[in-house]
Image (tube, grey):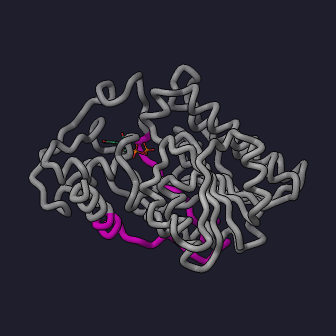
Amino acid sequence: MRYFLTGGAGFIGSHLATRLLDRGDEVLVLDDLSTGSMDNIAHLVDRPGFRYRIGSALDLPLVTECVDQCDITFHLAAAVGVRLIVERPVHTIETNVKASEVVLAAAAKKQKLVVIASTSEVYGKSSALPFAEDGDLQLGPTTHSRWAYACSKALDEWLGLAYLREKQVPVIIVRFFNTVGPRQTGRYGMVLPNFANQALAGEPITVYGTGEQQRCFGHVKDAVEALLRLVATPAAVGGVFNIGSDEEVSIRRLAELVRDEAGSDSPIELVPYAEAYAEGFEDMQRRIPDLTRLTRMIDFRPRTPLAEIIRDVVADQRARRAAR
Ligand code: UDP
């Protein structure tokens, strides 16, 4: 099969591309290298079946050409990372909404299957834990840029489902919860690579807020497995699926675990949100996926334990530091 990956030089995309090539599929990556990077796909460029184009997912003729050449599209290109979203809201809104419009319009020509990557952010401030896919979304005011991200991704979901209903484009929506693993960069504010880097450098590990907030971290290899199973399951079309782990950890505890794994004596420093982010910022206290629907649909649940995830991320950051 031939797969088209928008954002294929990003973190999740590059892992998905590797896995597809490993099993003998062909992969075409489109990436504008904004948050993605050639480093992420450098190990793939000489492999048979791999092609890449540097360009924008907003470029309709280019995207149409790519969609036409492939059987299935994973639309992973998006403006990601809380820091980027708060600092560049125009870019976030435009990229996320327009790119999905372009990809879906291209897919509509020949009714090609599209997976739209969404995010657990869409649940917003909901307190209905664990978050189930058909639960209500609870977003904050438009004066806070953070919610622009959630809203733009929610609109992507609506658009995808609208294309299915009105134009018979087979669409699957996936909501990634905190997905982590090798090659993720801390540059855009993601907590685990940040902590790993700080611990390895012997610098203070910066825990925002009280550190009592909790998250569930899922390994990217599990996320990739879930994606592959979903596209191989006809009944998944039209569905919205949480992808992630439901093993919770507080951010303060995460800092301790990372420090231990790195063999570091970095101090753990509490940083008020007002200092950490560019504007008045609301953090989610807890975020747990309900994985019932995913597990029923594909007979798989993300299973990499947190200790192994941390081990992988610390080892990856250590290797990158050594290579610098
Ligand atoms: N966080 C932190 N230190 C950092 C980066 C993030 O304490 O250097 C916190 C952040 O405030 C949030 C959690 O870690 O409570 C997860 O942040 P991330 O940006 O990775 O993902 P989010 O869950 O916010 O989408």
Q: Residue furthest bottom?
A: 23
Left/right placement of residue 276 relative to residue 98 reads: left
- The residue at the point 45 percent across, 27 percent down is 87
Q: Is residue 244 visible?
A: yes
Which residues, given as a range, are shown in magenta? Answer: 284-312
- Res 176 quadrant in image: bottom right
Q: Nearer the viewer, residue 72 or 278?
A: 72
- The residue at the point 62 percent across, 36 percent down is 95
Label count reads 0
Q: Position of residue 259 (x, y in %)?
A: 18, 56
Left/right placement of residue 102 relative to residue 118 reads: right
Q: Position of residue 234 (x, y in %)?
A: 78, 71
Q: Position of residue 9 (x, y in %)?
A: 52, 54
Q: Quadrant of the N terminus?
A: bottom right
The answer to whether residue 265 is above or below residue 147 is: below
The answer to whether residue 268 is above or below residue 257 is: above
